[in-house]
Image (cartoon, rainbow, N blue to C red):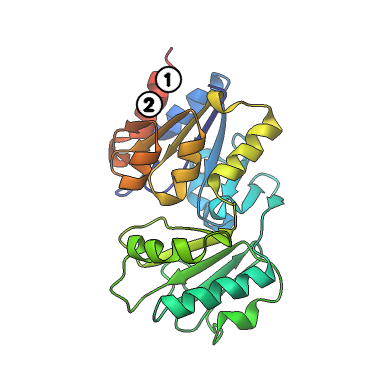
Amino acid sequence: MKLVASDLDGTIIRFDAGISTRTIEAFLDAHKKGARVLFATGRPPRWLGDVVDAFGTKIFPWVICCNGALLFDLHEGKVLKEWEISIADAFEIVSRLRKNLPGVTFAMERNDHYVRERRYIPRWDVGMDIIGTEKIEEQIDRPFLKLIARCTESDLDSDEMLAIATPLLAGLATVTHSNPEDSLLEISAHGVHKGSALAYVAEQWGIDREEILVFGDNPNDIPMLEWATHSYAVASGHRGAHSAAKNIAPACNEDGVAQIIEKVFAK
């Protein structure tokens, strides 16, 4: 294998203790044996502190962020490529979701800026946007990376929201989620996802999909799990990821990804 591409949360970042020593050593060993490593996450770059703590920035500098909307160089601290939602598409996406998801609230992500509606309750970027905006439409004045839709006061979970939004946004945007226990959707430009970004990087590096090992756990990983010839969903992951992957790895809290990497690179 020439490339190992992996999601972070719930895939290699354990629910109980972050990134384990075994997992760190497995990725470093794969690198020593000639493989490149690429992390692919829904997170923005500012949330990658634990990854930097575990691996530094020089060995694995490139990271796919925001579900494939951003390719970022951690070592250089710079954007390599962006695939943004246009202004016109953003207004249409928000309009359709407001009409069909009662009580929906929004936040949006740019590489240099995060903004939320006042009614949107953040769970991670608490304090990033203290004031907020009345309606997200007031802030759509240029393209951006990712739109986040939350139904805080709704009985709908993320899977149910996704079932409603997918046909609504077909041909307009890519909609997914990364937490079935939440009420949250993550929306990118049409055709933009982890799979498209991984394919772009593979082309830049001259690596065929048959030479790539991919790991994931949630619906936002499905495109890259489907695209790669050798893909694994962790056993603790979402049923949609299980269906998309070619294989099932042991659970995240069992260092499932490390177990597979050890076997593959022991050959």
Does residue 252 show up?
yes
Q: Position of residue 109 (x, y in %)?
A: 58, 66
Judging by the rendered image, the residue that carries numbered circle 2 is 260
132 over 83 or under it: above or below: below
Q: Are marks 1 and 2 in contact (CB under 8 Å)?
A: yes
Give the residue at x 30% y 61%: 181
Q: Position of residue 266 (x, y in %)?
A: 42, 15
Other-residue count near label 2 (Cα within 10 Å), few / some / many at <14 / 14–19 / ≥20: some
Give the residue at x 61% y 38%: 199
Q: Amino acid at mark 1?
A: Val
Judging by the rendered image, the residue that carries numbered circle 1 is 264
Q: Position of residue 233 (x, y in %)?
A: 37, 38
Left or right for 254, reference 120: left
Secondary structure beneath dot 2 equals helix
Left or right for 143, reference 176: right
230 over 146 or under it: above or below: above
The CA distance from mark 1 to mark 2 is 6 Å
Q: Amino acid at mark 2?
A: Ile
253 over 176 or under it: above or below: above
Left or right for 160, reference 35: left
